[in-house]
Image (cartoon, grey):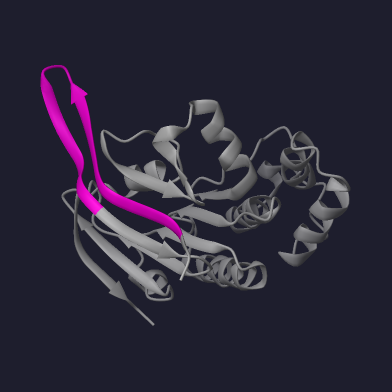
């Protein structure tokens, strides 16, 4: 079995003046390629910090993260950015769409920056797939929260990532809209074979993934297969 993400003895401490706060304490787990995985725990348990370290958005104090076969601490910040651009997708709670760009432009611009040919065609196909074929020329402020998150999903899958990190992807949505976005996320994941890593408070959503880990006070207290 190939593991796309390996986390070994990961510790992260933040300093505030003379005080030290250990946000993650000796966390270890691995994620098989093509699987779905959830990270759960109360607020302040270290979930988002862990996601940022796994995705190479932040650096570890001790321990290691190996993402897509590369040990992240061996890379410079620029090299980590290149790895993310080529192999990683992101979906955030607050959508993070560019307000001055249309739905289509939000999906296409990252592709154009990577020099992808036929970026416009790819963007249109993805927006059709997420049910926004008639909303491509709308700006984020003209879209509902659920529609904005669907644009964010289309953008996240646009570079055909090997692994997608979703931080509370339904956190800002009502229950019915959240359910639609969740179903779409798993559907796209299945179609593309992307590994899916979700940080969530929603235990129902976590229960839909193949595997779940639970954090409390920065420590891994549970590691279980859910299906």
Q: Main secondary structure of the magenta part?
A: strand
Name the quadrant containing residue 96. Answer: top right
Which of the pair 185/220 is nearer the observer?
Answer: 220
Q: Is residue 44 left or right of residue 200?
A: left
Which of the pair 154/147 is nearer the observer?
Answer: 154
* Residue 227 in picture, x, y percent from top left: 39, 82
Q: Residue lying farthest left? A: 18
Range of the magenta residues? 4-27
Say if 94 sits above or below 179 in the image. above
Say if 15 sits above or below 182 in the image. above
Q: Identify the residue at image location x=16%, y=17%.
A: 17
Q: Is residue 225 left or right of residue 217?
A: right
Name the quadrant containing residue 141. Answer: top right
Q: Residue 23: within the magenta?
A: yes
* Residue 121 in picture, x, y percent from top left: 88, 53
Q: Identify the residue at image location x=37%, y=59%.
A: 200
Q: How many marks?
A: 0
* Residue 157 in picture, x, y percent from top left: 66, 56
Q: Residue 16: within the magenta?
A: yes
Q: Residue lying farthest top? A: 17
Name the quadrant containing residue 22. Answer: top left
Q: Identify the residue at image location x=23%, y=55%.
A: 42
* Residue 60 in picture, x, y percent from top left: 31, 36
Q: Is residue 185 left or right of residue 139?
A: left
């Amino acid at each position: 079995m190939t593991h796309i993400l390996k986390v070994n003895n990961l510790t992260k401490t933040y300093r505030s003046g003379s005080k030290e706060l250990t946000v993650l304490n000796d966390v270890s787990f691995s994620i098989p390629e093509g699987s779905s995985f959830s990270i759960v725990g109360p607020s302040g348990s270290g979930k988002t910090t862990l996601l940022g370290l796994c995705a190479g958005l932040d650096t570890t104090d001790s321990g290691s993260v190996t993402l897509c076969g590369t040990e992240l601490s061996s890379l410079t910040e620029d090299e980590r950015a290149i790895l993310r651009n080529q192999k990683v997708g992101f979906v955030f709670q607050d959508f993070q769409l560019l307000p001055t760009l249309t739905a289509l432009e939000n999906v296409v611009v990252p592709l154009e920056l990577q020099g992808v040919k036929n970026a416009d065609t790819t963007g249109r196909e993805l927006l059709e797939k997420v049910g926004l074929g008639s909303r491509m020329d709308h700006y984020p402020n003209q879209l509902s929260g659920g529609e904005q998150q669907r644009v964010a999903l289309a953008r996240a899958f646009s570079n055909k990532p090997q692994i997608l990190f979703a931080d509370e992807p339904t956190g800002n949505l009502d229950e019915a809209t959240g359910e639609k976005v969740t179903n779409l996320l798993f559907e796209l994941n299945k179609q593309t074979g992307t590994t899916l890593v979700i940080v969530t408070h929603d235990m129902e959503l976590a229960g839909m993934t193949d595997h779940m880990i639970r954090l409390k006070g920065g420590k891994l207290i549970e590691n279980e297969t859910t299906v």
